[in-house]
Amino acid sequence: MSSELLPLVDRIALITGASRGIGRAIALRLAQAGAITILAARTERDLSAVADTIHTSGGKALVVPTDVTDDQQLATLADTTLTRFGHIDILVNNAGGGPPRASVTKARIPDWEWTLRTNLWATMRLTKLVLPAMIEGHGGAIINICSLAGLSGRAGEAAYAAAKFGVRGFSQSVFAEVQEYGIKVSTICPGYVDTALIPPNRRVDRGKMLSPADVAEAVYMVAVSPARSCPSEIILQPQHDPLKT
């Protein structure tokens, strides 16, 4: 099949949080474009289901169960991928989540620690592990899934907002360091996305939310953008406000 139909043919794409929701959609979209996908998340059974879907469609996927809050498991993920394939073309730091809404005075410190490790530290750590190979290869794309919470803080979401603001700042700094090597660094900041991370709520019209496929399409756009340009930040808003008034 031509490269026009498979623009990412044989590119190595590592995706965290790939077992469900946005990560699953990203893995399927990149595999559809020809990428060899490395699927990382905690639950092997769910990852295997995603891999089976990719294989059934004629794509290639490797499952590497990983808890991104564990530094050693992140190192194993990077080592496994680089040993098997020799390089990584696309890194999608997608794994994330937030604690229950709570004021700063009532929030639990363990919840803050988990939120920062999952959303910010894992992004920083895995990027550091992968970056030397990208620099050596003079190319690649690091795509960090952020949030509108990284643009504006809200009451009850202090730790999550701090983590996502941190992801944006980290991404901007990394790009300033590596753009001379032809490496793209992008953040994607979606609004409400219809995933299990948003529990049922009568105040929210889920039919007006973004879908995981919408975010996946933005990731794909970065991955296939011309080498001379870097879509450094993409903000995705639902066309219609899903919050009922």
Image (cartoon, grey):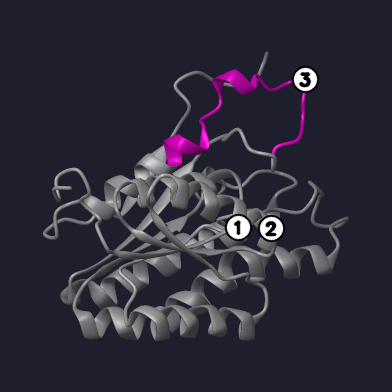
Residue 217 x %, y % = 36, 40
Judging by the rendered image, the residue that carries numbered circle 3 is 202
Label 2 – label 3 distance at C-alpha: 32 Å
- For the point 76% across and 35% down, the residue is 199
- Percent x, y for residue 137? 21, 80
Q: Quadrant of residue 37?
A: bottom left
Q: Amino acid at mark 2?
A: Arg
Task: Name above or below for residue 213 compared with residue 141.
Answer: above
Alpha-carbon neighbours of circle 2 within 10 Å: few (<14), some, or many (≥20)?
Answer: few
The residue at the point 65 percent across, 19 percent down is 205
Q: Nearer the viewer, residue 2 or 20?
A: 2
Residue 195's spot in the image, x, y percent?
A: 63, 38
Q: Which residue is mark 2?
A: 45
User: CB under 8 Å between callouts 2 and 1?
Assistant: yes
* First-in-chain label (1 vs 3): 1
x then y, percent, for residue 162: 61, 60
Between the C-alphas of marks 2 and 1, the distance is 5 Å
Do the numbered discs 1 and 3 sit on residues whose CB atoms are within 8 Å? no
Does the magenta-highlighted stretch encompass residue 204? Answer: yes
The residue located at (69%, 54%) in the rendering is: 158
Q: Is residue 162 left or right of residue 229?
A: right
Q: Is residue 206 left or right of residue 108?
A: left
Span shown in magenta: 198-215
| Residue bearing the label numbered 1 | 48
In terms of secondary structure, where does tag 2 sit?
helix
How dense is the environment of label 3, judged by Cα within 10 Å: few (below 14), some, or many (20 and up)? few
Mark 3 is on which residue type? Arg
The secondary structure type at the circle numbered 3 is: loop
